Amino acid sequence: MARKLALLGLTLALAACGGGSARDVDISGDTRPRAAAVSRAETDLDASAIAKQLFGRVPLASNQRSESFGGYAKGCLAGGARLPETGPTWQAMRLSRNRNWGHPNLVAYLERLSQKAAQQPGWDGLYIGDMSQPRGGPMLTGHASHQIGLDADIWMRPANNLALTRADRENLGSISMQRANGAYVSDSWTRQHHEILKAAASDPAVARIFVFAGAKVQMCNDEKGDRSWLAKIRPWWGHHYHFHVRLACPAGAPGCIDQAPPPPGDGCDDAQQWVNNILNPPPPAPRDPDAPAPAPKREIVLADLPAQCTSVLSSQ
Ligand SMILES: [Zn+2]
């Protein structure tokens, strides 16, 4: 399999060099060949193959220009950049998962956010959880999104020791910030969490940040200054051990599919409603006896992904 892919990669690399557009230099100066839209008939990759089986096993990024293809929950990443396992203000966690990869914009974002976190009392930086696989795509375990190198999970546990060993980073857990099923923050929540999430959401590269509803309401109540950043903080299930940052598609990335922006306003009323529903769950909607049974969830296959993802997979 590996050899087949390698041969195919060579063929595609040669093919890519033949195309004029493949040698265009992008604004970042990345001169590597662009992942082309490859017809699957030209490859020996099976279009009906389960995509996570393919993407979940590739150990390194493709040697292509860095580009995100598709949407956050259905796509892939060409030319992935690796977040160094340890930096001056961060450590990547759970290294065995090999998910410390992303678009270079995401790596740069995490580096600058971790510098800001390191200015908070009790924090030396950030512990970074899952980003993407080396070539993005669906994962064998966890996460529907994180597929195009623009999502990252950031631990809520204050990073106060940046000398963790590989083993520490497998075994250490994050800390939950929630109480009452996510309706409220726990005693572990601090003003530093507020400031780090505020810095995270205020960065113009960010599209959304997902965090449990009780944390959003707490930040809504505590913020006495500029509230515009709260719009990007979106309540979601889970997300009490970590918050999830989602960057917008990079400028000039035609193959990358943005999500609709969050609605205008700070979203604090919505978050309060979310909390109210946790505390007093509304009765379930009556079932329509004539409604068709929901279609069973189907695995994403290679043919579901943008055509460039075949090139991303086969590239060297
Ligand atoms: Zn996440």
Image (cartoon, helix red, strand yellow):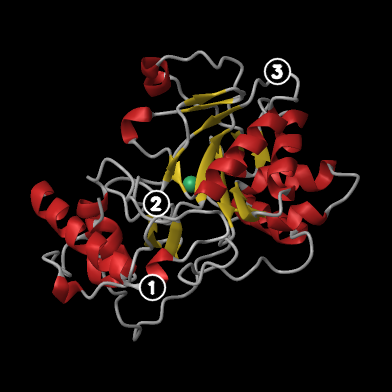
Q: How packed is label 3: few (under 14 Cα within 10 Å), some, or many (20 or more)?
A: few
Residue 300 shows in the view: no
The answer for how far apart the CA atoms under marks 1 and 3 are is 52 Å
Q: Amino acid at mark 2?
A: Gly
Q: Amino acid at mark 3?
A: Gly
The residue to which callout 3 is attached is 122
Element at label 2? loop
Element at label 3? loop
Q: Is residue 245 left or right of residue 184?
A: left
The answer for how far apart the CA atoms under marks 3 and 2 are is 35 Å
Q: Residue at x 67, y 44 (%)?
A: 214
- Indicate the position of residue 295 as horizontal and vertical percent values: 28, 74
The residue to which callout 1 is attached is 20
Dot in front, 2 or 1 = 1
Q: Quadrant of residue 302?
A: bottom left
The residue to which callout 2 is attached is 79
Q: Quadrant of residue 165?
A: top left
Of the numbered discs in the image, which one, if any, rests on residue 245?
none
Q: Is residue 248 left or right of residue 57?
A: right
Q: Outermost residue toward the bottom?
A: 290
Q: Residue at x 56, y 49 (%)?
A: 105
The answer for how far apart the CA atoms under marks 2 and 1 are is 19 Å
Q: Residue at x 64, y 32 (%)?
A: 114
Which of the two discs, 3 and 2, labels the residue nearer the N terminus?
2
Which of the two discs, 2 and 1, labels the residue nearer the N terminus?
1
Which of the two discs, 1 and 3, labels the residue nearer the N terminus?
1
Q: Residue at x 31, y 82 (%)?
A: 292
Q: Outermost residue toward the right?
A: 225
Q: Is residue 279 above or below residue 83?
A: below
Q: Amino acid at mark 1?
A: Gly
For this rendering, which residue is in front, 273 or 8? 8
